[in-house]
Structure formats: structure tokens, C-alpha cells
Amino acid sequence: MSSAKKDDLVYKALADRRRREILDLLRDEPRTTGDICAQFNELDRCTVMQHLGVLENADLVITKKDGRYRWNYINAVPIREIYDRWINKYASQSLDVLTKLKRDLDPK
């Protein structure tokens, strides 16, 4: 799969508030699918599973079966790749401009 297609999957996954909430839950510790479902009273289990499927497809969640439990782990690597490709490059340019502006405006 091309890098652009992988990025599209990550952006699609991150576009939904509930999927971001799931990632926030997993940031602290791995959780079973049942634990995640219990955090979303307004959603049925099937809907939560669909959200987890989108996250898995984007490689943001890695699952491991342990007996009858399905453990979900966050994989932050795709987010880091997006950061390195898009955010970091533009942020550093902005910081350079702001630093120069501050230097130019600072009366010494």
C-alpha cells in the first residue's frame, strides 16, 4: 500500500470523535473490547467494533486474542509519521519566522 493511502486511512480514522476517544482510552493502557464498549453507553457493541475496525485498518490499533478476550493496544507510529511528514515541517518553519520577527521587534 502506498504511503498516501496509509495516510488517508489514518486521517479517516482520526476524523471521528469517538475513534479519537478510543485512542485516548488506549493511550494509558491496553483494554479489552468489552472494556472499551463499556465506556460508550450510547453505542452498541457492533458500532464500537466498527470503530475499532477502522482504527485497525489504519494500523492505529493492534489486537491480540487471549482466550475469550480481545486486547486492544494503541500503535502511535502512524500518528508519528503524519507528524513528521506534515506537522513538524510546517511548525519548524513557523517557529523560524516567529523567532526572526521577535528578534526584529525586540528593542535591544
Image (spheres, helix red, strand yellow):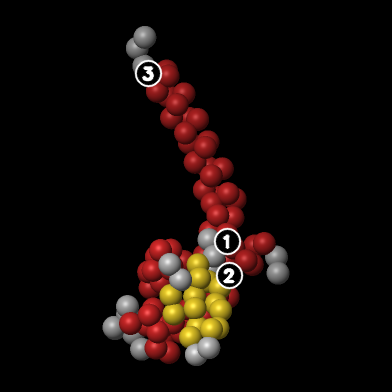
* Image height of 5 relative to 97, above or below: below
Mark 1 in CB contact with mark 2 (< 8 angstroms): yes
Q: Is residue 67 visible?
A: yes
* Residue at mark 2: 59
The residue carrying mark 3 is 105
**Which amino acid type is shown beneath numbered disc 1?**
Pro
Mark positioned earlier in the residue sequence (1 or 2):
2
SS under mark 1: helix
Marks 1, 3: nearer the viewer: 1
Which mark is first along the chain, 2 or 3?
2
**Crowd around label 1: few <14 · some 14–19 · many ≥20 (10 Å):** some
Is 5 above or below relative to 32? Answer: above
Q: Position of residue 94 (x, y in %)?
A: 48, 36
Q: Residue at x 41, y 71 (%)?
A: 22
> Residue at point 46% right, 71% down?
30
Residue beneath disc 1: 78
Q: Pointer 1 and pointer 3: residues touching (CB < 8 Å)?
A: no
The front one of 22 and 47 is 22
95 over 47 or under it: above or below: above
Q: Amino acid at mark 2?
A: Asp
Q: Nearer the viewer, mark 3 or mark 2?
A: 2
Image quadrant containing the C terminus: top left
* Residue 8 % position (x, y): 58, 66
Depth check: give the residue in front, 21 or 64.
Answer: 64
